[in-house]
């Protein structure tokens, strides 16, 4: 911290204007971001050829069954307000195009981060006056998959500065924190050993650009938080609840790790 | 709720061999697994799939418990005339899901 202040002061002293200092800092940040985006690999590149094939053809990708579910629900009026998603948001291909790349996002009204699932449920309870969908229900999974599918191919770009910064820091701390009986942190597998084998499986970088993802093991689509829970259980740690603050913060950090990767929802993984 | 997908080429020349692709949402419970209470989970699979081309059956299959969940099925058929290709999936409960698609043959 002291070093940075000194650096700032130095730059300020030499250039003499605040505007130039800001520009210089921006450039530095931009460069590091680009360098990181080149080195990272989507989980797709770790999958077997057969699994990749399933994802490549939209007709054979079973995740699209959930996209269809979401598409049906999009224009279905529910709740006391008698509104559907379509009544406010119109064509999802236009209105939801940016949603898939920018969540989790900081929301002023709740004073913390919110991910797509929570945003959908907030819309349902506040605007549609309908009951919130249960986590991992086919409706919530369907809608999340449908919404995120609209951003397919666009690079993930979440905001981690400003009001989101403290939550991002918490997410990063979670990622690096040892936990469970095996005393392992997320980073031990997904940063230090990505590409190596854990028993018969190849460890990926743990990128979430394809979520909600169709997992062959699950035989259905599942959310990011279901995956987090699974990982936590594997290191014999007590998993947090779906939609808990801990997991939403972690989701932001993990999304940021994969910034620049194209959204692949619904991806197919083993 | 759309729980099945069917894709047929929109146009084809007479005599061409076309590929029909389909996907259906189904848990395909094998009947071999046990639940948390230790009791076997009853079998619940799609036991029959059949395809008709303008009412004439062109393809059918009896499925067994080894078929995966949310099964994908693709087969080839010769395009003879314009019309509808319809697929029907029948499961152990007798529930039938059908999906149809139109094809124009020139």
Image (spheres, coloured by chain):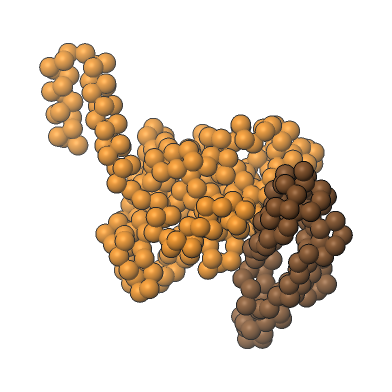
Q: Residue furthest front?
A: B15
Q: Between residues A202 and A250, which one lies in front from this camera angle?
A: A202
Against A264, is A93 above or below? Answer: above
* Quadrant placement of the N terminus of chain A: top left
- Left of B21 or right of it: where is A148? left
How many marks overall? Answer: 0
Where residue A118 appears, x then y in whole percent?
Answer: 58, 46
Against A34, is B29 above or below? Answer: below
Q: The brown chain is which one?
A: B
Any part of residue B51 in sight: yes
Against A30, is A117 above or below? Answer: below
Where residue A245 appears, x then y in whole percent?
Answer: 48, 51
Q: Between residues B71 and B11, which one lies in front from this camera angle?
A: B11
- Left of A5 or right of it: where is A169? right
Against A41, is A235 above or below? Answer: below
Any part of residue A79 in sight: no
Q: Which residue is drawn at 26% across and 27% down?
A: A27
Q: Which chain is orange?
A: A
Q: Residue at x 77, y 46 (%)?
A: B105
Q: Residue furthest right?
A: B55
Q: Residue at x 30, y 37 (%)?
A: A33
Residue A184: quadrant of the picture: bottom left
Where residue A164 appears, x then y in whole percent?
Answer: 41, 38
């Amino acid at each position: 911290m002291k070093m940075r202040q000194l650096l700032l002061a130095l730059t300020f002293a030499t250039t003499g204007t605040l505007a130039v200092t800001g520009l210089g800092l921006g450039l530095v940040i931009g460069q590091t971001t680009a360098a990181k985006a080149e080195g990272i690999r989507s989980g797709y590149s770790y999958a077997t050829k057969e699994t990749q094939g399933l994802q490549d053809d939209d007709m054979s990708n079973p995740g699209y069954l959930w996209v269809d579910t979401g598409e049906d629900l999009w224009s279905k009026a529910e709740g006391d307000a008698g509104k559907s998603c379509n009544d406010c948001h119109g064509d999802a291909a236009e209105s939801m195009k940016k949603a898939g790349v920018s969540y989790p996002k900081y929301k002023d009204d709740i004073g913390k981060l919110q991910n797509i699932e929570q945003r959908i449920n907030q819309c349902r309870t506040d605007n549609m006056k309908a009951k919130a969908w249960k986590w991992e229900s086919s409706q919530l999974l369907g809608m999340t998959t449908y919404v995120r599918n609209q951003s397919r191919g666009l690079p993930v770009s979440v905001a981690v500065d400003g009001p989101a910064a403290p939550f991002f820091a918490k997410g990063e701390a979670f990622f690096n924190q040892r936990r469970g009986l095996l005393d392992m942190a997320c980073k031990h597998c997904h940063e230090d050993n990505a590409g190596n084998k854990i028993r018969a499986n190849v460890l990926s970088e743990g990128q979430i650009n394809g979520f909600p993802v169709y997992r062959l093991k699950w035989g259905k689509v599942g959310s990011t938080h279901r995956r987090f829970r699974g990982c936590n259980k594997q290191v014999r740690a007590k998993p947090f609840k779906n939609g808990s603050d801990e997991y939403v913060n972690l989701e932001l950090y993990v999304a940021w790790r994969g910034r620049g990767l194209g959204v692949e929802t619904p991806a197919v993984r083993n | 709720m759309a729980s099945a997908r069917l894709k047929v080429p929109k146009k084809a020349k007479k005599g061409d061999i076309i590929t029909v692709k389909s996907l259906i949402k189904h848990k395909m419970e094998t009947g071999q697994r046990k639940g948390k209470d230790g009791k076997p989970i009853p079998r619940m699979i799609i036991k029959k799939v059949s395809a008709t081309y303008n009412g004439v059956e062109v393809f059918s299959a009896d499925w067994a418990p080894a078929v995966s969940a949310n099964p994908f099925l693709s087969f080839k058929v010769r395009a003879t005339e314009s019309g509808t290709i319809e697929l029907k999936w029948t499961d152990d409960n007798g529930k039938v899901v059908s999906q149809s698609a139109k094809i124009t043959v020139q």
